[in-house]
Image (tube, rainbow, N blue to C red):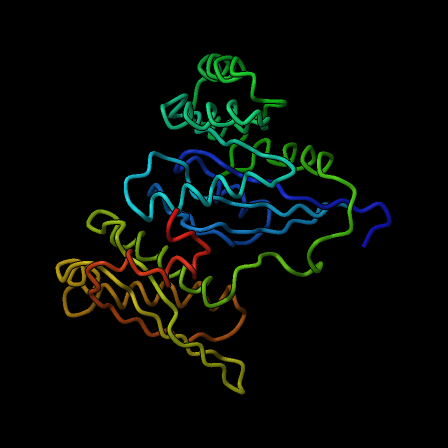
Amino acid sequence: MPENSRAGFVALIGAPNAGKSTLLNRFVGTKVSIVTHKVQTTRSRVLGVVIEDDAQIVFVDTPGIFAPKRRLDRAMVRAAWDGAKDADVVVLMVDAMVGLKDEVKAIIQNLQENNRKAVLALNKIDKVKREELLTLTAELDDSGVFTDIFMISALNGDGASDLLKFLCEKIPQSPWLFPEDQITDMPLRMMAAEVTREKLFINVHQELPYELAVETETWEEFKNGSVKIEQTVYVRRESQRSIILGKDGQRIKKIGADAREELTEMFGRKVHLFLYVKVRERWEENSNFYMQWGLEFNA
């Protein structure tokens, strides 16, 4: 550990699909938070640990903040605000293509009401004309919430290194909070389940509703270094189960193969993955799922 070490928590907050998980994965250098083009993909608080020179930043990737309608929605939004509450620095990511929509206005209003400052990361700048960017930046800056503003592209990395360097300077002097080789606090069983959930979104994005969950049921390690993972995909209706299985089970085989390939690369060892799809009509009323995700059941 460096003599003048720094360490602190940086919360990434924003509306769904603002690019928080993409930015986190870029900073960490590997995938710790799943990414799809679907909104509300991140369900729980995900920690990503980044070391840059003498600084160790613990990034908190939070679920997108939106107007909650269901129990799971409320739990996700609560997790997002809890992640921001105790952070040393809050970074509000705004999708420049979407602009100052109602969800962003509501987040800014919450920050104002709680007298909380934030750093603005205006994302996807490569997709928007310069004049529009300048107008949007001025509108956001008028809120009085932002201490600093960065224009970035989480996907291609534009401006990301400048933001990271700035954050390293803003966290307090402190011993590092995690071992040097640790990049996340997410258990491997949960990480494996998240990878499978990502592949489900990608493979059945047009038909698949958000009402599904993936649970790692068994994790068995063998002497040759390989691991056997059995997971259950829970859906609410039989018709959804049929969609995931596909004709003659071909779709679930494709999903399993995609997940297995990524997990093998991620864990650096052979993975034997077995997927089962079960119907549980009201799985989102089961508090066990919320405990696994670190969400508050009665939020």
Q: Is residue 82 left or right of residue 163?
A: left
Residue 90 against residue 181 in the figure, above or below: above
| Camera-side residue of 294 and 33 | 294
Percent of width and height locating residue 49: 63, 51
Quadrant, the N terminus: bottom right
Q: How many marks?
A: 0
Residue drawn at x 19%, y 69% as measured from the top left: 249
Relative to 265, is 221 above or below?
A: below
Tell which of 48 and 143 is nearer to you: 143
Residue at 23%, 49% in the rendered image: 209
Instruction: List x then y, in percent, for residue 94.
Output: 46, 28
Residue that lies at the very extreme toward the front in this rendered image: 298
Snapshot quadrant of residue 157:
top right
Q: Where residue 188 sits: x, y (%)?
A: 50, 66
Picture coordinates of residue 96, whole percent (x, y)? 44, 25
> Which residue appears at 59% of the width and 50% of the height?
28
85 sits to left or right of 164: left
